[in-house]
Image (tube, grey):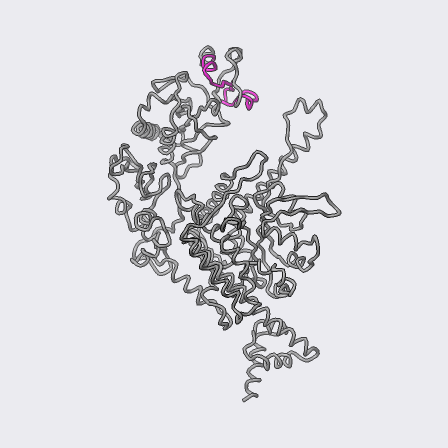
Amino acid sequence: MEIHYLKKLAEIGFSIIPCKETKQPDGAWKKYQSEARTPEQVEQLQSPKFGIVTGYNNIEVIDVDLKVFSTLKEQKEFWDEYLGFLTDNIDDFEKKFVIKKTLNKGFHILYRCSEISGNTKIAKLKGHTEALIESRGIGGMVIAYQDTLSKINYHEIQEITPEDRNIVWSCSKTYNYVNDIPLEPKKEAKEYQENEITCWDDYNQKTDIFDVIGSDFSIVANHSKKYVIKRHGSSSPTSGYVYKEDNRMYLFSTGTIYPHEKQVTPFIAYAWKNHNGDFSETAKDLYNKGFGSRLKSKIKQLKESIEIQEEKKINKEDLVFPIDIFPIDIQTYLLECNSKLDSSIEYMGVSLLWLISVCIGNSIAMEVKKGWIENLSVWISVVGKAGLGKTPSISNIVFPLTKINAKEIKNYIKESEKYDYYESLSKKEKEEHSEVKKPIKTQFIANDITLEALVDLHQESDNAVGVFKDELAGWLKDMNKYREGSDLEFWLSTWSGKSVNLNRLTRKGSFVEKPFIPVLGGIQPSIFNSFYTDENKDNGFMDRMLLCYPDLKIDKYNDSEISEDILKWYKETIISFYDTIKSIIKRDDEGEIIQLTSTFSPEAKTEWKRMFNEMTDIQNDDEENQYLKSMYPKQKSYIPRFSCLIHVFNDFFIEGGNSLIISKESILKAEKLSKYFIATAKKIKINSVDVSKLKNTITANKGKDEKTKLFEIWKLNEKFNRSETAELLGVSRMSIGRWVKEFETSKK
């Protein structure tokens, strides 16, 4: 590139930088991302190559790398098709875009636009790690090349409309291979057996996408790997593609009932065409039409496996965790972990609720009505005896977040080392060294639940700090120490989202205006029962805890293997959800989070008022056990929280789903979840009372042998809890059964 031409580019608003033969910038160039060299400065440059800084003066580049294709024939076919695609869909394309051929089997498409972004990988082919199409925008650069394929050169670069840019990106995204939902290995129809295939997989395998969309689109071109389709009545020459290999549609047009810029399977297309995108209703519809085995039989098996004490106040149905509150793809993942890894549906379900809460954090709050705002924090205790797989079940859900958290910790340590080194330099050495600013800790999951550690962490990770502990016994124990400035006072404030100010003799005061600290951890039932004290009953602490206590047995070795694909899919999905929430967080001039607010739709509001009044009636019922109905006031806070958590998470799985208006469906799902936690809490409270009676009877007969103690228990209640009694007496259930038979025989 001639220096006089580069000087001309500098005159019209290009930022020019020198580059090495390797195409890397020669020297520091961050300054020139916001401040261009003058034409005179450019004239003084001497370098084997020169670069154009993208992002400066709204310049953006689409970088097409044809090296990913193995043959020249494939490269030419793709470029001709891609260029034709852009030309067909953008008026006067050749007059608006600069196209340069690179020296390394690729092309640069340059333009100016008022809306640009940072460097982005736009499209990757199936089985490839390198991007086929990516952008160079804010913070990027490209080499300046001589050969021009377009009618205009660099100095004639045009500013295009955001609409034209959107078409370029949409067309480019059609080449990105995306596996939206985890699919089971394909099977022949004769191999279908009960519980082996979901209805959506079955439908996708048996249905051609054109059977669903044929009345809405026509084929306008037939390429080797895809059909080009056009919506009936569309003014544009094309609307999208149908991939032949995967039987999926990709639309870049928004003028249809179907999602755009997303891989659409026959199942997804059917859902939008017949059920307005409601996957649950679609699954029910197709199941009834004979597709797959769906979830019904597995849920039924799960219900039948649950054995609980006879108690009229507990609905057995409510004790089954309602996994249908989650998107259908997530339900598949939970059931796969359940069947292949023997993980508890209940433990995984509540852990996912905690995960969603941590991801959303302070970014969104729930406005129940004017003046009543709920944050979305949850406290969850996973209750179960040792060896029942609490930790593995939880880990199957939270591992994507813990990986992100670990990465944040490592980055902080690395940046802290750089900062410490910089601070150790002399004043003169610092002048010769690039400035290193003190890093901010971005860790957002804590194992240490001391107040000092949490407050320090929360001051930097202000959206949320999730507490995840294998054992919560120590945390709960501290709640029994109710005094001014105690841990309990702190935690009660954080649950409500009220500001906390930690003042201890050993430290300076620390203030968190909007604490958001969801809690998740395990605890053994014998330890948990001891925390149902009158004090904790009065202050409402235990009723803030959402309890998960399924009746489980230790499984024998399971030889089934879970698919790597579904584990990878789940990990990538959760990371994407976390990143999506992170991307919507906006801050004011002082760096504080500007909180978005979610509200009820009119239909959801009607359901909410019904639920609220039903719970109020229970609270006012003189015949209702006071001990059992104490959790209802907190459920009046939790149901709105649940509805928002469920709504936001489910919306993430729907193309274009970004509404903060809570739907009727979401509030009804929240009600299901609330009933589950209420039923579980009643079960634990009843069990706690029973255990307390057993302990009192055993204590009253101190010094007597175990058989005599059991006889006293049996006289008071012949339907006593045998498992708990065996554990308290330190004998086997077989001994309990044998002694009871003797008591019954002697009674006759």
**Viewer-side residue, 157 vs 184:** 157
Q: In this view, does 419 lie to the left or right of 239?
A: right
Location of residue 670 in the rendering, given as x and y in whole percent from the top left corner: 46, 56
Residue 500 on the magenta span: no
Residue under the point 62% across and 57% down: 472
Q: Which corner quadrant holds the C terminus?
A: bottom right
Farthest-out residue, front: 370
The answer to whether residue 687 is above or below residue 18 is below
Res. 335 visible in picture: no
Q: Which corner quadrant holds the N terminus?
A: top left
Magenta segment: 7-32
Location of residue 637 in the rendering, given as x and y in whole percent from the top left corner: 53, 55
Farthest-out residue, right: 505
Q: In which quarter of the image is residue 542?
A: bottom right
Q: Quadrant of residue 175?
A: top left
Res. 656 visible in picture: yes
The answer to whether residue 557 is above or below residue 374 is below
The answer to whether residue 393 is above or below residue 310 is above
Residue 8 on the magenta span: yes
Q: In this view, does 679 lie to the left or right of 282?
A: right
The answer to whether residue 165 is above or below residue 519 is above
Farthest-out residue, bottom: 748
